[in-house]
Image (cartoon, rainbow, N blue to C red):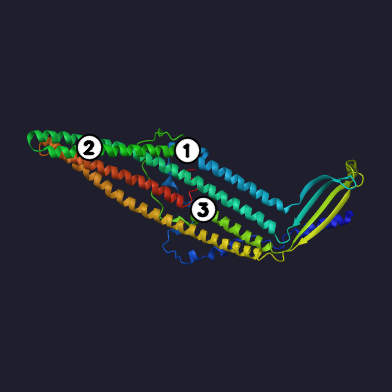
């Protein structure tokens, strides 16, 4: 009897080698990625910014570390620990990891204990049973192994999505931080502009007394001051809201009392002219789709295996008798049964065949989504670089205008000293200077936002700052 039992065990192990199971190779996945309609219409130009031969380790990130400040780094670290979305995503990832472990249990035998008792109402006898039952579905065609690997691929896809969420939250914190700094600077500039306008109002009052201005001139300048004060309040409120947003992103109560600096740190480093192609390939969203393609590969394999016969081996060890005391015979005269069952689907209305078609369609959908993610990545990089290039030119023109206005103001002040000009003209020029400085603040803010966008488009290694 024991020889038969051992032989059955050897047979089970040999049959569990998953005849129909296949691992997806790089060639398989690459072939799947190439079979898509989205990419078939795309032609990447020869002057493309990505260098296919460059190594990502050779790329300098000084152009993004220029944005680093101790406060921003502390805020990002705080956000990584306390942000609500990150905490929720962590639990979701934990659930997917547990589901992956559950999927693997189908590859092993299941053992259960059985204990029951019943009464025969005719003979008034009692029948009791105590047994251990084991069953094992031999994974002949790799159905269970494919299900396990599909769950594993889903886990790694979710892990990359979690990384993308961390990167996105870090980028949002950085943007909110710089938006708040820009708000602080704008408040100061607008307050200065209002002060210069009030000085202009005083000069209009003096001119009215001497007959060179009238009531309409005073009314116009007063209306401008009122409008500017309303605009200042709008900026202050927007700044409070940006502080609340920053507090919420870092897990704090959004009371709008977080303080940030009121100046931009100078940017020293330029954006590289080209980037290694592998940066794009290692983006978290693209990697997530890569594992979704792997998952679809396994699910197609699983659906095909479901149409084939399944073999299950079962055994039980126990005892049965007409009274409870006979349970002791388990140790003196145990009953051992070993058997097997073969189940093959014959007719189910085409359900299994349609399921294969669904899985093949889902696989094609994931491949197209992967191609769309690549296309979006290319667009994000192109857009950010184009915007940064334009912002650099705009900032250059604006700085030249500011320098010229400063020189003009200096000349005007000298003319006032010798009596060939007046304070009325000087104040107007000082207001023009403030306008240009406020415009430059907006350009500097946009530059920082686009640097963050480009960093995200290139994969945002180590979140925003390492």
Packing grade of label 1 (10 A; few <14, some 14-19, many >=20) is: many
Does the CB distance between marks 3 and 2 fall below 8 Å? no
Q: Nearer the viewer, mark 1 or mark 2?
A: 2
Seen at 72% across and 62% down, the residue is 19
- Secondary structure of residue under mark 3: helix
Counting residues from the start of the chain, the first of labels 1 and 2 encountered is 2
Packing grade of label 2 (10 A; few <14, some 14-19, many >=20) is: some
Q: Position of residue 462 (x, y in %)?
A: 50, 46
Q: How many marks?
A: 3
In this rendering, would 41 be left or right of 434? Answer: right
**Which of the two residues, 45 or 122, is positioned nearer the viewer here?**
122
Label annotation for residue 47: none
The quarter of the image holding the N terminus is bottom right
- Secondary structure of residue under mark 1: loop
Counting residues from the start of the chain, the first of labels 3 and 2 encountered is 2
Q: Position of residue 352 (x, y in %)?
A: 66, 63
Query: Which quadrant of the view contains residue 295?
Result: bottom right
- Secondary structure of residue under mark 2: helix
Spot the residue most to the front: 122
**Which of the two residues, 464 or 219, is positioned nearer the viewer here?**
219
Q: Position of residue 28 (x, y in %)?
A: 60, 63
Residue ID for mark 2: 225
Using the rendered image of the protein, determine whether residue 282 is visible from the camera's viewpoint: no
Residue ID for mark 1: 250
Residue ID for mark 3: 285
Cα distance, mark 1 to mark 2?
Answer: 38 Å
């Amino acid at each position: 009897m024991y020889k038969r039992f051992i032989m059955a065990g050897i047979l089970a192990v040999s049959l569990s080698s998953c005849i129909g199971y296949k691992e997806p190779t790089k060639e398989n996945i690459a072939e799947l990625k190439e079979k898509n309609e989205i990419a078939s219409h795309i032609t990447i130009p020869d002057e493309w910014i990505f260098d296919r031969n460059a190594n990502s380790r050779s790329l300098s990130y000084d152009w993004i570390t220029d944005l680093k400040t101790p406060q921003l780094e502390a805020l990002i670290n705080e956000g990584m620990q306390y942000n609500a979305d990150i905490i929720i995503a962590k639990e979701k990832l934990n659930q997917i990891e547990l589901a992956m472990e559950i999927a693997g249990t189908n590859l092993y035998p299941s053992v259960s204990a059985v204990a029951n008792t019943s009464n025969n109402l005719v003979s008034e006898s009692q029948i009791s049973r105590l047994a251990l039952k084991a069953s094992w579905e031999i994974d002949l065609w790799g159905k269970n192994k494919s299900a396990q690997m599909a769950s594993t691929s889903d886990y790694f896809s979710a892990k990359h999505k979690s990384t993308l969420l961390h990167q996105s939250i870090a980028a949002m914190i950085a943007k909110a931080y710089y938006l708040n700094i820009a708000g602080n600077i704008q408040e100061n500039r607008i307050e200065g502009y209002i002060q210069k306008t009030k000085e202009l109002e005083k000069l209009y009052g003096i001119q009215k007394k001497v007959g060179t201005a009238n009531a309409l001139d005073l009314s116009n300048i007063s209306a401008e001051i009122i409008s500017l004060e309303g605009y200042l309040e709008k900026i202050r409120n927007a700044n409070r809201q940006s502080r609340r947003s920053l507090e919420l992103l870092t897990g704090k109560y959004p009371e709008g009392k977080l303080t940030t600096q009121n100046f931009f740190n100078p940017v020293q480093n330029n954006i590289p002219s080209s980037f290694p192609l592998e940066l794009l390939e290692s983006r978290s969203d693209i990697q997530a789709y890569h594992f979704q393609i792997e998952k679809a590969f396994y699910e197609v394999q699983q659906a095909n295996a479901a149409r084939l016969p399944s073999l299950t081996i079962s055994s039980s060890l126990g005892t049965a008798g007409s009274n409870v005391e006979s349970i002791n015979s388990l140790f003196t005269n145990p009953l051992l049964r070993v058997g097997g069952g073969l189940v093959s689907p014959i007719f189910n209305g085409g359900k299994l065949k349609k399921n294969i078609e669904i899985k093949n369609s889902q696989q094609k959908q994931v491949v197209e989504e992967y191609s769309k993610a690549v296309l979006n990545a290319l667009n994000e990089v192109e857009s950010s670089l184009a915007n940064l290039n334009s912002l650099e030119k705009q900032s250059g023109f604006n700085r030249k205008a500011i320098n010229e206005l400063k020189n003009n103001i200096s000349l005007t002040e000298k003319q006032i000293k010798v009596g060939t000009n007046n304070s009325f003209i000087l104040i107007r020029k000082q207001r023009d200077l403030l306008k240009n400085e406020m415009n430059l603040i907006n350009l500097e803010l946009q530059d920082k936002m686009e640097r963050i966008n480009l960093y995200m488009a290139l994969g945002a290694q180590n979140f925003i700052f390492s």
